Amino acid sequence: MDVTFLLQLLINGLVVGSIYALVATGFVIIYKASSALNLAQGEFLMVGAYICLNLLSKYNLPFWQAILITFAFSAILGMLIERLILRPLIGSHLISVIMVTLGLSSILKALIQLAYGTDTIPFPEVFPSAPVQIGPIPVSQGYLYAICCVTILVTALTMFFKYSKTGVAMRATASSQQVALTMGISVKKMFAISWAIAAMVSAVGGILLGTIRGGIDMSLSFMGLKVLPVVILGGLDSILGAIVGGVIIGILENLSGGYVDPLVGGGAKEVAPYIALILILMVKPYGLFGKKKIERV
Amino acid sequence: MRCGDFKTSYSADMTIFESHSARVMLGLFLCLLFSLPLYTPGYLLDIVNRIGIAVIGAVGLNILTGFTGQISLGNAAFMAIGAFSCGYFGIKFGLPFYLCIPLAGLTTAFFGMFVGIPSLRIKGLYLAMATLAAHFIVEFLVVKWESVTGGVAGLSIPAPKLGSFAIDTDARLFFLIFVITIMAVLFAKNLFRTKVGKAFVAIRDQAISAEVMGVNILKYKLLSFGISSFYVGVAGALVAYQAKIISPETFPVTVAIDYLGMIIIGGLGSILGSIYGAVFITLLPELLRLSTSALAGPFPLLVAKLAAMKELVFGLFIVIFILFEPAGMAARWHSIKSYWKLYPFSH
Amino acid sequence: MKFTRVLAAVAAMALTASTSFAAETIKVGGLWDLTGVTADVGKPFADGVQDAIASINEKGGINGKKIELINVDYAYKIPQANATYKKFVESDKVVMINGWGTGDTEALKDIIAKDKIPYFSASYSGHLTDPTKTPYNFFVGASYSDQIRGFLDYVKKNWKGKVPAKVAFIYPNHGFGKAPIEAGRQYAKELGIELVHEEIIPAPVQDVTSNLLSMQKKNPDYAYVQTTVAPCANLLKDAKKLGIKTIFFLGNYGMTEALPKLAKEAAEGVYGMTTNVPFGVNVPGMKQIFDWDKKHPSTDQRDTVYVRGWAYGLVWAEGIRIADKNKQLTGEGIKNALETLKNFDTGGLVPPITYTSTDHRPTTKSTIYMIKDGKMVKVADMETPRRKEWLGL
């Protein structure tokens, strides 16, 4: 049993999974706060990455400034989308909401393609590229920074939701909109904030991916599709589920890539998360940590 | 012109054609339709054939999603199963096309019912994701199961033959496709006048109440998956004959999203809506290509941006329709019709 | 303002329509990937062909007739390629097509033979070289199979160890990726080189760390990567992160000037095969490209693949010219004209091109380049023998 091989796969899975977790968290925040399913989450990630890249390479801003401006842009984008597109659809059929975010993802993808083309654009080196030795395995520094970033962000979000007034207000809105309204919470404001946070969180994911990969192109939007098994696995309304799900899927992908791919001649890596998804859904139809939906007649 | 509803019997209420003139109009339309191959050039006929196939697929998806309320993203996978099984039966067993197509439909129906089994436990978005997972699994199998599907290189489908008469030109395919399309649409329209169809709609509206009233949810959900998948499988088989070459790349997940777009824009829960949606979404890339190449003189960059424009327009139309016309084109047509029917009254 | 622009467009359309009735044009279909998974090399190739033809048209065209390239972007979607082919043949009535990808070219090979339309593909698949199977398929340069054989020859020549050299093949699981693999397997066996591993990678740009780790377990000395430049760059970066010591060889769509730009330090010391000279190399044919570049400057990349497209345009325009001289400007006439090309010189852009009615391999020469200090540096010229049993492999 090659332990080095296994450890390398696990670490890579952890890194990739933490980014999935990040994007999934954004998805879950929106679902929890406004019961909307944002299938355009992958495109938020892409927009964040491209804007940041543009700021870094075209305007040569220092990294911290670029990130802050990207956050501002993503937050505004999220709030605009919520106000213009999701607000009118409150209360409509689930499939309408799914389709409108799908349509939105097409629009965002197309706009990026028109603006930046489909070539891979190199991302400026933000982290030093020399790998760091952890035991027997060389780990790229970018990976470590990514894991650190994600951990900090997720901790910050958890504390925000637990202790800050706005965070508690958002949880209240997610739990019951009507009661929150009677308590004086502006539900509209909560919606807007949740979309803004989700967009920013995805932007972080996009920037991290860009620095790790060294370049960004249209394939970043596939993240959106990858995130779906993660949120389903973890449960649509659980942030903890998003994190656990993300890491599980990331590790699962890499393990199947390393061990199953040679057996079946490739392709297992892409399909493994989906097989896992079906198996988990059969046992826990609301995901690992999701709350069972009580249907009323 | 008639004004208002004057139905005096149950059968009159259930009828598909509300007046004699509606029947006449439909008859004229069909005559016009079947005369198309006489004067339409090959390339346009190819588009029309693809519309016909899309109609079958859209009606199938609408049965499952629009009428029974089960969101399915596995459409592309079902079409792939239909296409590859049709090819397999035709190539390996040498069966004629009038056996291959129904067999392909049945294979897909069987698989569809299998996918539908979890639908009793899994609902809503979770079910949609499970069907998406099924799509990727099917895609993986199609690539790996080389003995049946030809793997990455795909299958070259021999033309359907009636004795020595080969159906290989666009005109001949037109007749094959549209005869099946008309049968499919007729069957679907009538399905929702029967007990089965009404059970589907009951499941969509209030599954728990339906169960309480004695509708066997599992049986009808599976039946819905089965019938819908049969339609989509037949559509896939026709794609195989029409494209003549199929490979795993012929049915990516964007096809499933396109079909969902068709029934949303056309109208969920409406057969006529499926037809409108199918026509619209199939024609959209062609119209875009025509306009960008026509405008290629003063705006030469447009040609290179065509793929992005197609996505942009597709996304825009979906968002606009959902925001402003959530019941789809069928509803819009219905309101236009009733405006004329009731003029000068407003209701 | 908008209205006048539209009016101008309509007027322009009307004008071009009327002028196209006046002068006779030779219609050629151009099927490109400008926005799909191989657009990283599809776009410069399309630019190269289009510019070469525009340059020929500027100099008078073919015996006074202009070549009209009808450009369509099919984004590497095979159903789209089929539909566009129908449009080219039935509605535009083209006499020839310059296509792109392996998947769709191999899918169309029977129909183009039936319709007698010569089809130049940017795909160098060895499966397109046997006129008994694919009489109407052509390409310009050494086939993927000959490239991988060139790589194996180089390994054999330079291997100094006592045990046989270990190689691995890395490729995506589609027509383009798989094209040279069987040829590579057979030739490696013949040369006594040990093929220790074949790794299948996903086609679009994705994390390939687990794939590389799998490969590393077998510890190959060399690895041949058959994919386009963007996924190659991504793979090289992942390899560098993992500290993989294998020496990488890329195919002719991986070794381009874009590689060091995308992969930066990870591209250093990487080898690759080219079927044509990179941009700027001092050969007679480069002059016309420089002239064009000066007259029509552009921000689009002008690189090895651009030169490749240019060479394509020159070769098939020559075929059209010969066919027109013989008054046989039909698909079949152009095919016969192309098969008379013997050591046709494109000014040194590609090695001399020869087609015969029994062999559609234009050349078996390829050149190995290496990335040094961020630039492509020539290493060696390779030529594989023209064996009959390798026709169509």
Image (tube, coloured by chain):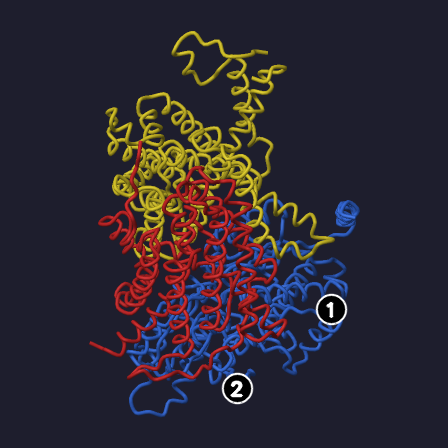
Chain colours: A red, B yellow, C blue
* Mark positioned earlier in the residue sequence (1 or 2): 1
> In this view of the protein, can residue C275 be seen by the observer?
no
Question: Could you tell me how many numbered marks the image carries?
Answer: 2
Measure the C-alpha gap from mark 1 to mark 2. Answer: 30 Å
Q: Position of residue B280 (x, y in %)?
A: 54, 38
Picture quarter with the N terminus of chain B:
top right
Residue at position x 27%, y 35% in the image:
B222
Give the vertical position of B3 relative to C275 (above or below): above
In the rendered image, which residue does mark 2 sit on?
Answer: C372
Q: Quadrant of residue A249?
A: bottom left
Q: Residue furthest top?
A: B8
Residue C296 marker: 1
In contact (CB < 8 Å): disc 1 and disc 2? no
Give the vertical position of A105 relative to C323 (above or below): above
Residue at position x 65%, y 83% in the image:
C282
Q: Position of residue B179 (x, y in %)?
A: 44, 29
Q: Residues within 10 Å of mark 1 (few under 14, many from 20)?
A: few
Q: Residues within 10 Å of mark 2 (few under 14, many from 20)?
A: some
Picture quarter with the C terminus of chain B:
top right
Q: Amino acid at mark 2?
A: Lys
